[in-house]
Image (cartoon, rainbow, N blue to C red):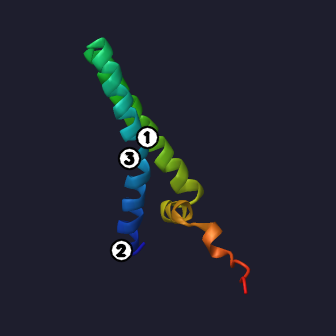
Amino acid sequence: MKPIKLLVEVMGWLRVFLSPVIIGGIITFVAYGYTQNIVVAIVGCLLSLVAGVWVAERIRKKHGTINFMSRTMATPELDKEEPTKN
């Protein structure tokens, strides 16, 4: 694999990985605020990291990270031509 392509794939993998990690981090932060229990915070962070790796690897194996990211950013409704009004 060429270095540039590898770098782009890694960047896509990190973007996919960060989505569940950020969501889990926010949930963990709120849960820690209510319980004030460090075990809850550690377990929540670990679960978020595991979920991020699982989602990113699943997408990488099934679609490829760049193909997945380009599909989610595409706007298919803009690709269709609208009938012209005269």
Question: Which amino acid does the dot numbered 3 rest on?
Answer: Leu
86 or 61, nearer to the observer: 86
User: Which structural element holds mark 3?
Assistant: helix
Quadrant in the picture for residue 82: bottom right
Residue 3: x %, y % from top left: 34, 73
- The residue lying furthest to the front in this view is 86
**Which residue in the protein does label 3 denote?**
18
Left or right: 18 in relation to 75: left
Q: Cα distance, mark 3 to mark 2?
A: 21 Å
Please rate how many residues cluster around mark 2, counting C-alpha atoms within 10 Å: few if below 14, some from 14 to 19, many from 20: few
> Label 1 to label 3, Cα distance in Å?
6 Å
Amino acid type at image mark 1: Pro
Q: Report x, y in % for residue 84.
A: 71, 83
Q: Say which quadrant the N terminus sits in.
A: bottom left
Q: Earlier in the sequence, mark 2 or mark 1?
A: 2
What residue did someone put label 2 on? Answer: 4
Q: Are marks 1 and 3 in contact (CB under 8 Å)?
A: yes
Mark 1 — residue?
20
Residue under the point 38% across and 37% down: 49
Q: Quadrant of residue 40?
A: top left
Residue type, label 2? Ile
Callout in the foreground (3, 2): 3
